[in-house]
Amino acid sequence: MTRWFMILFAVLAFLSVSAPVPKAFAEEEPKAPPVLKPKKAGVESRLENVKRLLEVSSGADRVKASGNADAIAKREEAIAAMVLAEESFKSKDYKESNEFLGQATTLMFEAVRMVGTGNVSKEKKLDDYNRRAASVNILLEALERISTEKKSGREVETQKDAIEAKVALSKTLLEEEKIEEARRELDEAYELVKVSIEELRGGDTLIRSLEFATKEEEYDYEIDRNDTHRMLIDVLLKEKRKTESIDNMVSKFVTQSESLRKEAEAQAAKGDYETAIATLDRSTKELVRAIRSAGVYIPG
Amino acid sequence: MSMKMRALRIMLMIMLATLYGLSGVGDLARAEAEDSTPQIQRAAKVNTFNRLLKPPSERNLPPAEDGIHDPTSEGTYLLQSPREAFDSLPKSNSGNRVDWVKALEEKYIEPRFDRFDPEKKPMVFDLNIVREVKGSMPDVVYPHKQHTEWLDCSNCHPAIFIPQKGANQISMASILMGEMCGVCHGKVAFPVSECRKCHSQNKTAEAKN
């Protein structure tokens, strides 16, 4: 219930902004979306739903019980828009009816927002604080590492000091149970560490190369690769295998693959990883064939 | 703003809200407080893995039938059906059939970055991490840029990834099981079936085995 309410609140918060219309919609471009043509059945069910929103939803209850005159007045406005929607519906102007329904919904959400969403629990605030602190700490570590790597010098040192000072202040505030202030300092530290990292790393491409220290390690990788493709058969071919001919073909390749895998495992058990790797590769190729034979083209 | 855009914004906001702020992360935070269960396990409960790999008849169902929204809540019926809402957005071949990266880039949509602050813009961070893959399979390019247009650093660091090149053990199998990249891909971002979106860097001829 609270969860739904919070989502409702997010919607509210969203509705209250009238952000600029995106270019693609503002100008006459071939891509412009077709105008929505509401159908009778759709509007009818929406009428019912909006009516419930205004009359019996938890939001409606809260507004009614709030004693907040502004919120109650907003709800009255919403009801007025709803009445207009009903009239338009009766005169078969579904487009207009739909527009009034939109207005009614917006107004009602505004009313609900006026009475608030209740208090966020202290426990949640603390959880959120701790999660944010974990991010700040790990990003600060990354910043330190990168700045050493890049020998970035004084400027980054100064930034780091400023961030650390904010983190320390935030901790003190938290100990004093000033959680809001603590969070504000922490958020500032977070923004700073993001910007510092961006300044150092923005535009970079890092390559994590694949290197195997031993043949055994490479064998383990091949086992993973084999497992991956086996899993892909389940994930990608579930629908296709409902066709018997496809299923038969896939099964044939899978069986071949399985026997090669057993062979590879036996070779590895004897310590012959080199041969085992080659055998596993053949096993995986059978699985790739199975997938492609069902008409799903995967690279590799 | 047109009604349609508005409805679309609501849809999007709800998607993002459910995912990042309101329900999911709240649960995650609680899970973390109660015990040390990895957050990822809780995330899997909220968004069934591979739900983006559905046959056409089950794709983009109306909110009341999608198994995500509460069908007994009146609010659910106020939401526009995704089939209708997505109609004018750039298409993709998978998931909910929308190319969300393109939709954002070309300003078909302009979601808020912050729930409460309409002015706040994301800090877009252009750092690519290339992870080499054996054989002729193209290498994986992980782009921070596209991610930070949607997400905040704290969505991934440290809950999903340690921010250090190579510090995370990532395998395709783990992704397929809904971990690592699979915390999102297959649930709320394009699914694993789109190999080439991740495996986007072809090998040079001599690198192939």
Image: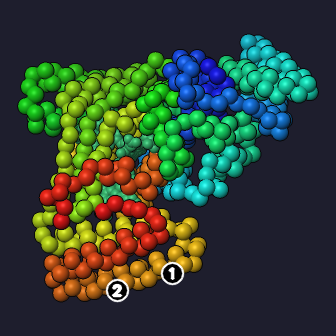
Q: Chain of mark 2?
A: A
Distance CA(mark 1)–CA(mark 2) = 17 Å
Question: Quick one: SS at disc 2?
Answer: helix
The percent coordinates of residue B107 (x first, y second) are: 48, 27
Give left or right: position of B5 versus A257: right
Q: Residue at x 22, y 21 (%)?
A: A162
User: Could you say which is closer to the camera, residue A73 or residue B171?
Assistant: B171
Q: Chain of mark 1?
A: A
Give left or right: position of B113 versus B14: left
* Tag 2: amino acid: Ser
Give left or right: position of B168 versus A231: left
Number of other residues with Cα within 10 Å of mark 2, as a class: few under 14, some 14 to 19, many 20 or more: few
Q: Residue at x 47, y 70 (%)?
A: A294
Quarter-of-image position of residue B102: top left
* Tag 1: amino acid: Asn
Q: Residue at x 36, y 52 (%)?
A: B196
On the image, numbered disc 2 is attached to which residue? A259
Q: Earlier in the sequence, mark 1 or mark 2?
A: 1
Q: Quadrant of the N terminus of chain B?
A: top right
> Looking at the image, which residue sits at the far right?
A90
One can see residue A67 in this view:
no
Taking B75 as reference, is A257 above or below it? below
- Please tell me whether mark 1 or mark 2 is closer to you in this view: 1
Q: Quadrant of the C terminus of chain B?
A: bottom left
Number of other residues with Cα within 10 Å of mark 1, as a class: few under 14, some 14 to 19, many 20 or more: few
Using the image, tell me which numbered label, if any, was put on residue A248: 1
Taking A62 as reference, is B68 above or below it? below
